[in-house]
Amino acid sequence: MTRFERVAVIGVGLIGGSFALALKAANACGRVIGAGRDRENLRIALERGVIDRIAADAGEAVHEADLVLVSVPVGQVPAVFAAIAPALAPGAVITDAGSTKRDAVAAARGSLGKHIARLVPAHPIAGAEYSGAAAGRSDLFRGKRVVLAPVAETAPEALAQAEAAWKACGARIFRMTPEEHDAVFAAISHLPHLLAFALVHEIAGRANSAQLLGYAAGGFRDFTRIASSHPEIWRDICLANRDALLAELSSFGKELATVRALLEAGDAAGLEDLFARARDARRRWLGGEFEP
Amino acid sequence: MTRFERVAVIGVGLIGGSFALALKAANACGRVIGAGRDRENLRIALERGVIDRIAADAGEAVHEADLVLVSVPVGQVPAVFAAIAPALAPGAVITDAGSTKRDAVAAARGSLGKHIARLVPAHPIAGAEYSGAAAGRSDLFRGKRVVLAPVAETAPEALAQAEAAWKACGARIFRMTPEEHDAVFAAISHLPHLLAFALVHEIAGRANSAQLLGYAAGGFRDFTRIASSHPEIWRDICLANRDALLAELSSFGKELATVRALLEAGDAAGLEDLFARARDARRRWLGGEFEP
């Protein structure tokens, strides 16, 4: 089994912390060095054994690391890449955990230099509405999907090593291009998040919001669960994937115009058909029909 | 404790079946007579002891009943009221379980005649994406809210008896006017259902829907759970509450225009603020701050 002697985790939140815990649980790594903005969070991570040492900064963390995970809000990835580039060991494999991939590749091309050959952009499909190192779990990625989005520059052996690391975390590995990835996730993840945030924000801003929320129940709770996601992380994702997300907003706007027209026309058969198609697609999805 | 000797349930689905089971479990009723369109469903209800007898039709079911629950898709309520009106015993209390209330009141005024004094429009806030008598559970309403929406004609003793019946099911009772009820639920229930159906329908209709759904994960699952709701039931709710729902669609459209403008402008602070307000409101809601 591939083993990493020294792992640097830049951004020890839910994802970074869980990555460290998972590698440790699999005995796939030696020491884990953590770096990040939030000292209190790093202290908790150290105390709980998520990391073994707190680095002074990202550059110092990656010094001598053979595996580097960059798991910060995607808006900070360019600055982190710029900070670690001069300190990276020649053989270090770099992977990330951002929910957008084109921006990570662009940032790498701007600042990683020759190290881009060892970059394996990744997106673990395993979130939660919780955040911080304290929420980290060694089984967060178990059975979950990780999309690897290597680029032309990615060296095959770096790809194999990054894949081994994510596999050691229990993940199932899939491959997409960064462009394909960002288009897919705009539709099935980023747009739903935006809609959930928008719905709760709209209701919370009304004069009678307390009465409205007073009667909200299970359907509302599940529909809006993702509106409890981290505002900064989602601000960054939305901006990084802005063009794809705007296209999704347009498509959804057209769908809502269709629904409105059916309602205005009192088209009972049309509404029932639309609802039935949605329920059927979801049933087939739950049944595993679309498993990649 | 108020006890009902003979209960008629018109529409023995999840709600009607659970009402019967709950009253039986509380020893608050004698025999339960069921009526409905789906003979196979009624047979299952009888076999499982949800009901004690299958009536030939709704009119025959209510004959001699002292409590009648009308729990059919709301589009069928007018026809059911018309069918039972000639057969109702003078003292029978009638309640319903529809997700819209103005339409039930209008239907009652059209066909219940003097029996409207014994009608107590009700909306149990306890759904599930399951349906049918087989999904019925005696504890479905336990701790859940039931909104009673009595009208000027409702006799106080009928209100007290209907309240006692729903309380016997374990529900917590709240009171609203039919108008207030329909406006509130358009915002926090009917719109989210419409959005969830629309999102799944839009994605399912694309050429690459299989790829998209192949990567959909937990956030998508929860956001779209209510898109597995019953198409006919939701067709009827949307049409019955059409004016309020169209108003909600307009409000949400304005909110989406705001979100789009923030995205187009790359307004990071504005997006983060909107997301943070949504998260904060949801956190307070989960914390029980808006409990009525």
Image: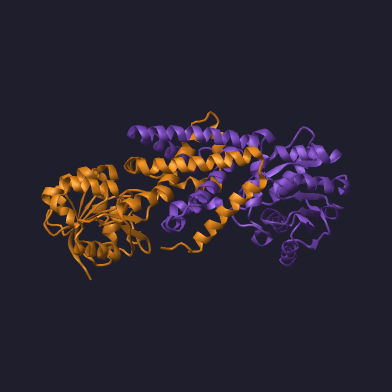
Chain colours: A orange, B purple
Could you tell whether B212 is left or right of B189 in the image?
Answer: left
Q: Residue furthest front?
A: B207
Quadrant of the image containing the C terminus of chain B: top right
Q: Is residue B252 left or right of residue B171?
A: left
Residue B256 on image: x %, y %: 46, 36
Image point (67%, 44%), residue name: B123
The extreme bottom residue here reads A1
Q: Nearer the viewer, residue A215 or A39?
A: A215
Coordinates of residue A234 in the picture (x, y in percent): 36, 43
Q: Is residue B114 visible?
A: yes
User: Relative to B15, is A5 above or below?
Assistant: below
Depth check, front residue: A32 or A260: A260
Residue found 21% across the figure and 63% down from its top? A156
Give residue B7's quadrant in the image.
Answer: bottom right
Looking at the image, residue B91 sits to the left or right of residue A226; the answer is: right
Q: Position of residue B288 (x, y in %)?
A: 51, 41
Residue B141, visible in the rendered structure: no
Between A36 and B200, the one lying in front of the other is B200
